[in-house]
Amino acid sequence: MIKRILINLLFISGIAKLSESFNKNKVVVLAYHRVCPIDPKETLIKDMVVSPEAFDEQMQYVASNYNVVFLDELAGLLESDSLHGKHAVVTFDDAYSDNYEYALPILRKYGIPATIFVPTSYIDSEKSFFWDDVAALLCASKLKSLQFTFREKEYYFDLSRNMMSKVYGEIVAIFKKLDGNEIIDLKKKLQDKLGLDCESKSMTMSWIQMKEMKEYDITFGAHTHTHCVVASRNSDDIKREMIISMDILNRELSQQTTCFAFPFGSLKDVGENAAIIAEEVGYKCAVTMEQGLVCAGDNRFLLKRVGVGGNDNFKKFVLKVSGFIPFLSSVKERINGSYHNK
């Protein structure tokens, strides 16, 4: 409630217009995951889901106030040091099928180009994302607690309602450290302990749908092959993930893949060498999930974005794209960093 009141006061104050003016030669790269009707029971993934109504309102605002460009156009502007004017870029991570069903008609309505980042091993497969499976299991569980042993480590979680978001984040963090069969094993253990059988199903779009979307100013970038945390991989594995995903996209979509998005996207998830490797294998740019606007002189392979989710009402969205909320977040991080370094 307090946050909502604060957002309303900031919006009324006109700070967004002031922030836009201050950031007039910076670019907002919007980061979405899903666009679909929001299930009130799926609170754990609400920040990954934007309703079609909210997305329509957001795209109308962006189309009216910004020159929306392709991501590789932004890379060209940065490379040529010609970043002037009010530009925006729209991106989606993970190639969810609802991008085709709900987002595409709205993007076409306003003539907005977009880039969708594809984890290629998930396309036309039966694979599901572990974070969706974890959310489904926790939301369906009636237990008050969860206890299990995995990789010789004991875990205990309080499943009371007010702790559920925290527990979800902690379990997802465990999954992020795993690969392949380990992910399958932990998911099976959770199902057994919770007494549930969460049927895995693919939620990604098909190659056929992607080919259709290409006709409407939608481009596709790489998101690794297996949606791995690249910081946990050695240089050869990172290069392999980047090249395989690029080659598959080039072959399936008859395109030259130039853009890359780091899975999960924090600098901790990216690691030290991945940005250099992305340039070496032939990408023109790479985006993170570090929050902020893109400025002239920024590293093209560590571009910031502004994440948009179901917890963002229209006023908060405007404050985000203006750069004001990302600025506040960066100040908060610096203060916290200074405090922890004392």
Image (cartoon, helix red, strand yellow):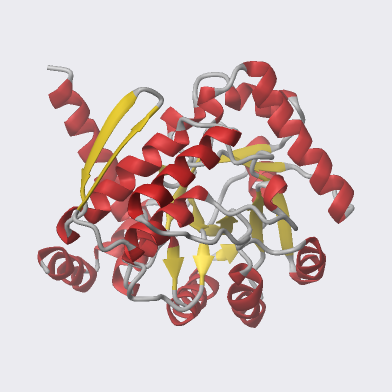
Q: Can residue 300 be seen in this view?
A: no
In depth, the one of 254 and 174 nearer the eye is: 174
Question: What x and y, as percent, mark residue 94?
Answer: 59, 53
- In the picture, measured across the screen, residue 94 lies left or right of residue 314, that is right
In depth, the one of 143 and 112 nearer the eye is: 143
Rendered residue at 85%/55% (across/down): 253
Vertical placement of residue 94 versus 315, above or below: above
- In the picture, measured across the screen, residue 280 lies left or right of residue 287, that is right
Question: What x and y, as percent, mark residue 170?
Answer: 31, 41
Question: What x and y, as percent, mark residue 145?
Answer: 21, 50
Vertical placement of residue 99 versus 166, above or below: below
Question: What x and y, as percent, mark residue 30?
Answer: 50, 57
**The N terminus lies in quadrant:** bottom left
In depth, the one of 174 and 223 nearer the eye is: 174
Rendered residue at 63%/48% (across/down): 74
Vertical placement of residue 214 versus 247, above or below: below
**The C terminus lies in quadrant:** top left
